[in-house]
Image: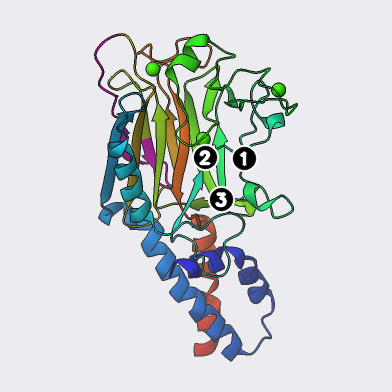
């Protein structure tokens, strides 16, 4: 059914073509439209009724490198991965990959030096067409009013010597390098000039085709204040499906022990078209934006395999377009 949803979107143009060729034999038109009809029923069920029947599954956990206990984080992450299904890897969804089924991941670690701090990271880096390397074809897009950065690795200019840019966003503040940690070595993700970003989805390899996913989760680092960090899930109509605070790492004393907090939420069906991330209360320069003074960064993103969202107006026109064919048959 979900694979059919992809076919519907790609072939919408054929609806108009079919209507303009009215001398085509009815048998062909009828079979074609019946195919569309059943696909529309499937798509409609998924995208327009889903918000009334969906259930959610929340996975979360915290831990810290210094306490040598990341089991709550890894267990929650692995549960979430299992909730979504097999990792479909990189590139366009072909072969065993079915749109809407399985998952993708981003760990930032293969981002080149040229797109890492202090350089800005483009929000469409992983939302490219197949003319780009497969690693950049994942169907996930980021937007913010600020500027994204991926942290430098240990040798930020590739000359074989450490630096010159400090890892873990230490180039923005020494506090960052003290408090942040990489869950997957060694790059992490952050924002300058804002504490909010939006995540949207496309069919991998087709950046112009908006898509929805079944679930989305992030491993955050250094969430210390309750309520400072949050995920808001939106459906295709812009309605909030769920808002969940990311659990803070509970600590006693003056340091967060380079902690991690994972939160992932999945639904019965791929109905999430946007996720808003409130990433703590400050940006990488420790300029306060949110109500809580809590610097937070992000590492691993895990999300469901995107499936195309049909446009409601196109769906309506297509269904109306079926009517003259039926009238001709009766006459
Ligand atoms: Ca170097
Ligand atoms: Ca990483
Ligand atoms: Ca913090």
> Is the CB atom of the residue marked by disc 2 within 8 angstroms of ligand 2's nearest atom?
yes
Disc 2 target residue: 107
| Lower position in the chain sequence, tag 3 or tag 2 | 2
The spot of residue 83 in percent (x, y) is 33, 54
Residue corresponding to mark 3: 202
User: Quick one: which residue is furthest to the front in this view?
Assistant: 160
**Labels 3 and 1 touching (C-beta < 8 A):** no
* In-front residue for pair 104/98: 104
Q: What residue does disc 1 label?
A: 110
Front: mark 3 or 1: 1
Q: Which region is colored magenta?
A: 232-253
Lower position in the chain sequence, tag 3 or tag 1: 1
Q: Secondary structure at mark 2?
A: loop
Q: Position of residue 124 (x, y in %)?
A: 63, 39
SS class of the residue under badge 3? strand
Give yes or no for residue 239 being in the magenta stretch. yes
**CB at mark 1 closer than 8 A to ligand 2?**
no
Taking depth in this image into account, of 30 and 256 the one nearest to the observer is 256
Mark 3 packing: few (<14 Cα in 10 Å), some, or many (20+)? many
Badge 1 vs badge 2, beta-carbon distance below 8 Å? yes
Q: Is residue 319 left or right of residue 239?
A: right
Ligand 3 shows up in the quarter that is top left
**What residue is rendered at 56% in x and 63% in y?**
9
Q: Is residue 235 left or right of residue 204?
A: left
In the rendered view, tell whether residue 324 sits above or below residue 126: below
Q: Nearer the viewer, residue 325 or 264?
A: 264
Residue at position x 37%, y 34% from top? 231
């Amino acid at each position: 059914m979900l694979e059919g949803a992809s076919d519907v979107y790609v072939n919408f143009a054929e609806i108009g073509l079919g209507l303009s060729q009215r001398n085509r034999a009815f048998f062909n038109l009828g079979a074609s439209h019946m195919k569309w009809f059943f696909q529309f029923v499937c798509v409609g069920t998924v995208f327009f009724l889903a918000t009334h029947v969906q259930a959610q599954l929340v996975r979360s956990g915290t831990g810290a490198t210094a306490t040598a206990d990341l089991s709550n984080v890894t267990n929650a992450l692995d549960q979430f991965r299992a909730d979504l299904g097999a990792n479909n890897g990189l590139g366009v969804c072909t072969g065993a990959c079915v749109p809407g089924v399985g998952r993708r991941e981003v760990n930032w670690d293969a981002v080149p030096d040229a797109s890492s701090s202090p350089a800005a990271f483009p929000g469409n880096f992983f939302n490219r067409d197949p003319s780009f390397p497969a690693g950049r074809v994942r169907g996930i897009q980021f937007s913010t009013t600020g500027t994204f950065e991926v942290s430098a690795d240990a040798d930020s200019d590739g000359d074989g010597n450490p630096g010159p840019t400090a890892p873990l966003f230490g180039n923005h503040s020494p506090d960052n390098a003290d408090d942040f940690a990489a869950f997957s070595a060694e790059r992490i993700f952050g924002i300058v000039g804002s504490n909010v970003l939006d995540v949207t989805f496309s069919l991998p390899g087709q950046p112009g085709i908006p898509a929805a996913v079944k679930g989305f989760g992030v491993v955050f680092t250094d969430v210390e204040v309750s309520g400072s960090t949050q995920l808001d899930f939106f459906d295709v109509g812009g309605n909030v499906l769920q808002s969940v605070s990311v659990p803070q790492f509970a600590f006693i004393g003056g340091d967060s022990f380079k902690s991690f907090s994972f939160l992932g939420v999945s639904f019965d069906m791929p109905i999430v078209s946007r996720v808003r991330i409130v990433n703590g209360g400050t940006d990488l320069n420790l300029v306060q934006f949110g109500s809580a003074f809590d610097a937070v960064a992000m590492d691993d993103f895990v999300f469901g395999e995107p499936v195309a969202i049909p446009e409601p107006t196109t769906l309506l026109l297509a269904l109306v377009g079926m009517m003259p064919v039926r009238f001709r048959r009766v006459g």
